[in-house]
Image: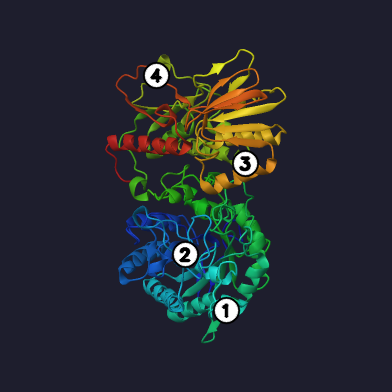
Amino acid sequence: MSQLFPHLFDPIALGPLTVRNRIVSSGHDTVLDDYGHIGDDLVAYHEARAQGGAGLIVLQVSGVHETARYTSHVLMATDESSVPGYQAVAEAVHRHGATIFAQLFHPGREVMDGERGMAPRAKAPSDEPQERFKVVPEALTTAEVKDIIAGYGRAAKRITDSGIDGVEIVASHGYLPIQFFNPGVNTRTDEYGGSPQNRRRFLAEVVATVRESVGPDAVVGLRISGEEKTEDGLVATEILDLIDHLDGLDHDGRDCLDYYSVTAGDSSTLQGAVHIVPSMQVEAAYATNLSEQVKKITDKTVMVAGRINQPHEAEAAIAEGRTDMAIMTRAMICDPEIANKSQADRVDEIRACIGCNQACIGHFQQGVPISCIQYPESGRELTFLPRPRVRARDKVLVIGGGPAGLKAAAVAGEQGDEVVLCEKEPHLGGAVLLAQELPYRSEFGGAATNLSAEAARAGVDIRTSTPVTQALIDDIVPDHVIVATGAQQRLPALEIADDSLVIGAREYLREDPNLPTGRVLVTDWKGDWIGLGIALRLAAAGRHVTLATAANFAGAAIQQCTRTLLVSQALRTGRIEFLNDARLVGVDADTGYLQSTLCEIVHEVADVAATIVSAAPRSVPVDLDFGTASVTVIGDALAPRTVEEAVYEGLTAATEIAAWQRTVPA
């Protein structure tokens, strides 16, 4: 038992089951499906988290009806072909002592894509349009409503008969069950619309049908947003009234529901959707105020999601009575072993999620399998795990202590090689150290901290303030060299008057110079964090800013939930003006000149006191003789991109070295 987290590792009853601890991996779409079924990749993904000590694992949504296909890769539980997958994942999770549930799902109007790129078609209580995905749904007939309700029951029985311990009805984030309850979405005039009693009828009948279908021995829970946090969305008092009604439902003397999984937000607007996967701008454990309210009206188990990334956050929320269980989904994407490490009080070894959203929900929104920028093994368990061990201990020289070099060094060290990492600067982390200087980006530095600690634990000989010279190479005589020297700032070809102040973004962040009084023009080539972050930093200091981007809009390269919060904050400052589709071509004493990327128009930005340029960086070359050593170039040294590609290439480079050495399994 953990000395630091006694509440977190106290077993808890859920219906007839006992879950070994209070750590939950909630349902989240992984895009690891096998043509709509559970395959080997998804089984390995969840088995890694069960092996890592999670108490409860909830599978991603399973469609209960043919009209529930909200993406092209959704799991479907509508026929017997789904059974082998549920059996396989249940067996894998149970093997390690964890409990597993599956989500029962219908999106209603929240449909993301149609067949082969066509506009999505959706069924909903009424034909009220959906703002975020621009969907106008078809209103369900009463007969279709009843068939969908029956579909929940059929899917629940199929899933639990396959060995899954329980099911969770998804009524969160504006999906179909809560659409029926919302008077702004449900304008029906039949028995499922109109009065509050009629509007909650759909969900009440779903709950009763599911309980009847699975019997008394399976667990049934409800996933619900404690507040939708969007304009005209459902508020906490409305949700609490609904929960109070559902809490009294029973079947043959058995409560229909065993627990409530509380979250926040709504999928139908950008404003509400940020709470589906809140980014690093949002306070840790912020939704526990919602779960605390639910706990006041029910004696059933309550769990909560919302940026609970560290065990001490989960422990405090449970100890203070704000929740019974802590949902730590992204924390386990980043570190599947977080539960085991926490239980053993090895908190310094935890690879903490930084809430960047780039490779988890960011990948999902691109329709590709999810992962983690810090731990690319997530979602690739069958490719990279278990870590191989080398037969012979070779010497590996890693040049560069940024994310790419640190990951390569850590993995090579874990595989058993003798690794030397040289970084010319006094500190490890590379460009990550600049990224953390931006507003709402301070946690990003955690990536460097985590990777540095992993390299140190792997026994890497880390040498900072050590440029790699020919003499050093001749002294080490490496068998393998991994070049991870990163990238450097460059400015595009510009016409710049002698009396104008133009500096690069990296220079600005590194040196924080005193800029002259007046408007600052920030130009951004990519639409990523840099330009938008610098504009926010300047606005917070009271400066007026014009942010000009060559992208279609500011933050275009940032994951949607994260971008929404950043841009909304920029709008609130009242100090940032936006100019899109424009590249900087010249600057004189007080004017910036920007060429439209769409046509021949040239924009002029007047009264400019200083210009900060975020331009495409340039790789840093290495011109040394490495003798007979194999040489691999990775990360920005190969081609400037993001931390995700750098860390992934560090992993693959070290893994390939092990393959060259004719590895044996760990």
Q: Quick one: SS at disc 4?
A: helix
Going by the numbered disc 2, the residue's amino acid type is: Pro
Spatial CA distance of label 4 from label 1 is: 77 Å
Q: Return the residue found at the far left.
A: 662
> Are circles 4 and 3 on residues that touch, CB within 8 Å?
no
Q: Secondary structure at mark 1?
A: helix
Dot 4 or dot 3: first in sequence order is 3
Which circle's residue, 2 or 4, is located before the other in the chain?
A: 2
Q: Name which of mark 2 and mark 1 comes first in the sequence.
A: 2
Tally the numbered discs.
4
Residue 227, above or below 495: below
Q: Residue at x 32, y 24 (%)?
A: 629
| Residue at screen point 35% across, 38% down | 655
Q: Which residue is mark 3?
A: 440
In the rendering, which numbered label is found on residue 198?
1
Q: Which residue is mark 4?
A: 473
What label does residue 137 carry, if any? 2
Quadrant position of the N terminus in the picture: bottom right
If you read the primary sequence from the N terminus, does the residue marked by circle 3 or circle 1 appear first?
1
